[in-house]
Structures are given as C-alpha cells and as structure tokens.
Amino acid sequence: MGRGESAAPTLDYDVWCSASILKGAGFPLSSVSTPFKKPDELRRLLQGCQRYFVTAAIFSLAINLLYLAGPLYMLQVYDRVIASASEITLLMLTIALLMALLALAGLDAVRARVLTRASIRLDQTIAPRVMTAIIDRAAGARSYLLRDFDTFRQFITGTGIHAILDLPWTPIYIAVIFGLHPALGIFALACSIILILMAVLNEWIVKPPLSESNEAASRNYNFTEMSLRNTEVVRAMGMTAGLLKRWSRDRNRMLERQVVASDRAATIQSLIRFLRLAMQSLILGLGAYLVIERLTTAGAMFAASILLGRALQPVEQIVGSWRGLISARGAFLRLRELLAAHHAQEPHLALPRPEGRLSFEAVSCVAPGVSKPILRGVTFQLEPGEALGIIGPSGAGKSTLARHIVGVQAPSAGAVRIDGADVSTWIKTSLGGHLGYLPQDVELFADTVAANICRFNAGADQQIILAARMAGVHDMILRLPEGYGTHVGEGGGILSGGYRQRIGLARAVYGNPSLVVLDEPSSNLDSDGDAALADCIMHLKKRGTTVVIISHRPATIGVADKILVLREGVVEMFGPRAEILARLTRPVPVHTVRETTG
C-alpha cells in the first residue's frame, strides 16, 4: 500500500450475516445495514451472539439444499426409473432420498438447538444491561421493559425466525424451476412476487392497529403494577369498582385494536394460503400443458409443483407470525431507545474514597412538562463530619434535593459535588459504596434481613451486625423467627413500618459511608426509635461521616449542626442550628390597637 492510501474497510462476514438476519426479520437496523458504520449499543451487545446466528444461517443453507432431494427424487423416478423399469435404480434413489431426509431432520433439530443456545446467550449478555438501564431510569422504571426484552429474545430465537432464515433461499428454488423449463420459472417468479406484495399489504393494514394495541397494553400493564402496589388503599376505601373502570379503559382499547388487527391479518393470511395452494395447482396445469406439447417431462411437472410450494412457504409462515414480528420489532425499538437514553458508563479512573465534603452550586431542577422549577439556585456547603437538618413545608423540594445529593436525579442546572467532584462523573457502583440513603418510603427486598442490610454483598457478617447495632435494631432482629436469616417478604411486608425503617437505616449506615442522607427517618418510629436514631447520627458524626437529615420532628433536627430552610425550591435560610432556630422562633411583635369610644 502506497503512502497516502487509506486502508480499505474490511468486511466482517459474521457481522454482515447477523445484521442480514435481523434486517430480514423486519427490525429497522439503520446502524446494522452496513458493518462500516459505528454500531449502537444494542447492536454491539447482539454481536456477542453473532456466531449462533451465523451457524443457524449456514444450517439453513444446508437444510434448504437438502429439501431439493424430494423434487429430484420425483424427477428421476418419473423420467428414468419408470422409463427404464430399473428396480435397482429405484432402490438406490430411495436410499439416497431417505439419507437426505434424515440429514435434513438432524440439521433442523441442530438449528433449533443452536437458536435455543442463542436465546440463553442473549439473556446473559443483554438482560443485565437492560435491567441496569431500567434501574437508572429511576422513577420511570417499569418491568414491562424487561418483558420487551423477553419478547424480542423469544422471537429472534423461536420458530418464527426459521421462516426468516429460509426466505433468502427462495431464489434457489425458483432458479431450479427455471432449469426445468423457462415458462415454469417465469410462473414461479410471478407467484413469489405476488405473495411478497401480499405480505407488504399485510404490513400496511395490520401494523397501525397492532401498534395501537401494544401501546394500550403497555399503559394497562403500568396501571396494573401501580394498582397492585396500592391494594391496601383500594380495599380499605372501596375503590375496586371505580379502579376497574379506569383499568378497563386501556384494556378495552387494547382488545378492540387487537381484534381489528387479527381480523385483517386472518383475511390476508387466508388469501395468501388460497393463492399458494392455487399457484401449486396451476403450475401443475401449466406443466401438464408443456408435457402435452412435449416441451418437458412429467417428472419436471411434479417437481416444479413441489419446489414452488417450498419456495412460497416461508412467505406464508412470515405472514402467519406477523403479530409476533410486529411485537418484537416494537420491543426492539423501545429497548434501543432505553439503552440510548441510559448509556453504560465507560471505564475511567476511579476516584478515592471521599471525605464527605458536600457542596451545591446553584442547583436547579425542572421536571419534564412542568414550567415551575422544583429547586431554584440552591447553594450551600457542608464540611466532613457535619450534620445538616433540612426543613420546610410540604412540596418545598426537600426529597428532590435528597435525590440530587445521592445522584439518582440529575440537576437541570448547576452541580452537586462531593469532595469537589461532580456526582454525575462518579462511577455509580464506586460512589454507591461510600453513600448511605434512607428514602422517605422504605421498601425492603424480598430476601433475608442480612441481605437487605449488607446491600447483597457477601461475606460481611461483622459489618452487618455493626450496622444493625448502630441503627439500634440488632436486638429486635434477634427476636425474629430466624434472626438475620428471616425472609422479610415482598417489600418487607411481614415487618411493621418501624421495623422496616430501622432496617433501612442499618442498610444506609452499612460499610462506613462518607455521606448519609436520611429522608424523614423518624416518620414510623416510637420514642425508643427516636433515641436510637439520635444515637446513630451522633455516632456517624464522631466517625467523620457527613449527615443530611430531612425531618419535621424537632428532636431529630436537634442533633444537626446546621439548618437549611427550603421553601418553594429556594433556600430561605442556612446557617448554624442555634442561629436558624432562634430566627424561626423569634416572637412576632404584637401591635395593640387602642380602642376609642365615641
């Protein structure tokens, strides 16, 4: 290569084959249309399974070549065996046919096994990344996105993909028919074009109602999840009848559009089946005419009919599985959008353990679709080991401020820094080990008490007990049926609210964090719990941990070094606790009005 010449891009055949299979399935992979373009994340993850799809495509080639054994057998029997009356020839042809069919069945079974292994590999490769993106989606997280992944995975590794793999070999059958006689080949080509046009028509009339049905189904699943999380409220206040009416709205819409799509698809599928059967019979008629005119043989007539049926079969199968194809394509688009919106963090330098210095620099937050900001220009700073109490009326933005501190919500403007580093630049898995967070609504995971406290980190028994003692919940845990090994149920349902809150506090202080954020940590506590919480905060301060407390209880705020008063998203007051409390409790002058008597 001469100087100045650029290296030609190399074509990765495996990537091309995998991309072709997915595009053939109808997935709009603009980034997969050529191996020279920079791939998106979903395509990059799919490349980890490309060897399975390439292997399946190679098996499909062999399978479709072996399908020619039947027509060739018929051609030889009619044209050679019957004419020569050779029994030995018939025997050898029959043995060869049976061997070819046995090999075909074996390859078909192996192809199915390969696609099953591809399904497992897809799940191991992509499902964790999808789950991570769902978690990073924070308040918008919905389990239906994981169902989307399962829908996509099951389609591209299920029986529907077999028709996609067989479709590219349709031209081979048509070429063989052309070899039998040009007139038969032209007829077969016209038939395949007609069925392809019918498939396009099916896409045009079925896709709109089916897409609307899938959207309504997603809304219905979301509402169902929300309703099931609030069953106690629904049952206690007799909301079942009204809730069912609201729940049925999207479900009825889903069913109505589903019926329309199914009726249209059934009509097109029936028409395609009629055309395929008619075409197979008509090619027999055309072949019979050619035989009468002595332009071809009887064997070619029957072979052409079988080949045409095989050539048109994938088109009919694809139309029959069109609903699954549309659902999988919609799921793919949502997954690609999810991964594009929540990029995986690139590996970079891990920052050292923070000391706990917290600073807000003109932080503002505006919720999507809302003009009024939740936080406006919030600025303050805390030194390591200080405790800050945040107070303010409901709706002031206190919980939003807490979410900004721990990095689960990004500011619209400004920056939140820990030890001078923007929270958004920290590797989440690294920063999370240095933070403790007790949200306002405490939910435990369906596992043991120990697993909940240690954040599912293994081999940390002493730290688990230390965190439980700091939260003042160790003795209470020992009284549970299996102690630290007690399963708490979904959301911690077997425990009282106070139990859950104190176990949540133990989880927050586990691992000696540098910064702990407690959002209404005493809302479910009794007097003993309040005392244990105060002791825990004092212990954290002695260890040099920075503590942020959001509470309406004076006793809880009493251990704070500084107070921040938040009102309508704006810092109204910030300073030492004694000074701020003195300003808040300063008596208001009473002006007496001298009464005058006429």
Image (spheres, helix red, strand yellow):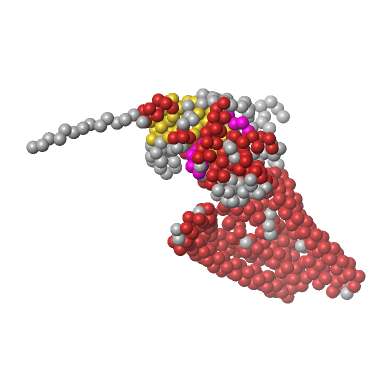
Q: Looking at this view, is 233 or 539 the one in front?
A: 539
Q: Is residue 514 covered in magenta?
A: yes
Name the residue nearer the viewer: 322 or 292: 322
Query: What is the quadrant of the N terminus in the image?
Result: top right
Pinpoint residue 161: horizontal percent, then vertical percent. Answer: 67, 57
Where does residue 88 sit, x and y in percent of width and height? 91, 70
The image quadrant that residue 362 belongs to is top left
Q: Give me the residue at 53% from left, 39% from top.
A: 528
Q: Which residues are magenta?
A: 510-525
360 relative to 201, above or below: above
Q: Is residue 425 magenta?
A: no
Camera sees residue 91: yes
Residue 525 screen position, x and y as percent:
51, 42
Where is the C terminus found, in terms of image quarters? top left
Q: Is residue 186 left or right of residue 55?
A: left
Q: Residue at x 44, y 35 (%)?
A: 554
Left or right, residue 547 beside residue 99:
left
Q: How far from the left and from the top, in percent, is residue 323? A: 59, 60
Is residue 86 positioned above or below 342 on the image?
below
> Looking at the image, can residue 145 be seen?
no
Compare residues 123 and 380 and report the one nearer the observer.
380
Of all residues, the one furthest to the left in this rendering is 598
Residue 212 in the figure: left or right of residue 11: left
